[in-house]
Image (spheres, helix red, strand yellow):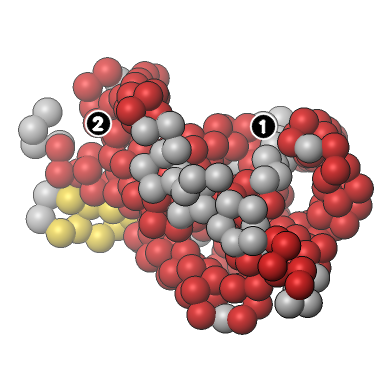
Amino acid sequence: MLETLPQILAFGLVFGGVYALASLGLGLAWGIMHVINFAHGEWIMISMYFTYWLTILFGLDPYFVMPINIALGALIGALTQRHLVEPVLKGGATATILSTLGLSSILIGITQAIWKSTPRNTPNVYVETSLGIGPVRLSLAHLLAFAISIIAITAIYSFFKSALTGKAILATSDLIGDPEVAGLVGIDAAKMRVLTLILAGASTGVAGTLIGTFYYVYPYVGLTWSLICFVVVVLGGLGSFKGLLIAGLIIGVLEGLGSLIFGSAYGYILVYAAFLMILYLRPRGLMGRRA
């Protein structure tokens, strides 16, 4: 067991970075807009399918599909906000939950009708190429996914930290800013909400492309990723990029250790045990803000 520990820890850290990126869009919608997007996993699933089919049909490198998936994710985010979330926003969290849950069911149904339930893997050289450092060996697909995940999270964090538009979005959030003051200085809250879900959708385009290089896709894969993303966001704390990244890394490592100790079928035992313990001790998550 000790011989495989470095491999498990390395793999867990790599997966943890991907978990953090996959959760970013959910964290943006929830932390900034108080919108709990139950279709988040399906947004990732759509990008995974586009990665698969564009690679198969046109022989594209899967990473060349990423700009298409980013644009597609941004479009889905904008349409969801304008036509599904915004009309029911005054109904509170329950209304947005039901709306996005309905969208989730529709997307699952459409993908199942088009692509059936057969799991599919995107063929690529990256997952077949491995690199080793000492006793640790990881596929190039996993290493690139980790590196690009960290770059994407850092870029979006810098956007909110430095760009005027990013600061304007944060200013309209009840959790992070002050919507009344934002309105007084001329910030259009409705426009900022659209931009928030555009960013959330674009991030799922990146995540879906990366995940699609090493993870199989089928119509219900979004449910698996939604569950992981919810745990990451709640554990990290709403409104915290650092908390999101730390939570993703923790969950990745605990999943690996759980698989090593209890077997792959029970790999999430340690994840949910730590999740419940941390929330009991710190209900706002590791680095969550006070509402």
Label 2: which secondary element = helix
Place of residue 185 in the rendered image (x, y in percent of width and height, measured from the top left): 73, 77
Query: Which label's residue is closer to the chain start, 2 or 1?
Result: 1
Please say if the residues under marks 2 and 1 sit with CB atoms less than 8 Å apart: no
Q: Which residue is mark 2?
A: 257
Mark 2–mark 1 distance (CA, rounded to whole Å): 26 Å
Give the amino acid at mark 2.
Answer: Leu
Above or below: residue 54 compared with residue 34: below
Q: Position of residue 159 (x, y in %)?
A: 54, 75
Please provide percent x and percent y for residue 39.
Answer: 72, 40
The circle on residue 220 is 1
Q: The C terminus lies in which quarter of the figure?
A: top right
Q: Considering depth in this image, is 172 or 191 the residue closer to the camera?
A: 172
Q: Position of residue 220 (x, y in %)?
A: 67, 32
Residue 253 image label: none
Q: Amino acid at mark 1?
A: Tyr
Label 1's element?
loop
Seen in the picture, residue 277 relative to 177 is either above or below; the reply is: above
Q: Residue at x 12, y 28 (%)?
A: 1
Horizontal side, residue 81 vs residue 232: left or right: right
Say which of marks 2 and 1 sits in front: 2
- Left or right: residue 88 versus residue 126 is right
Question: Which of 60/42 is in front?
Answer: 42
Determine the residue positioned at 68% across, 40% down: 36
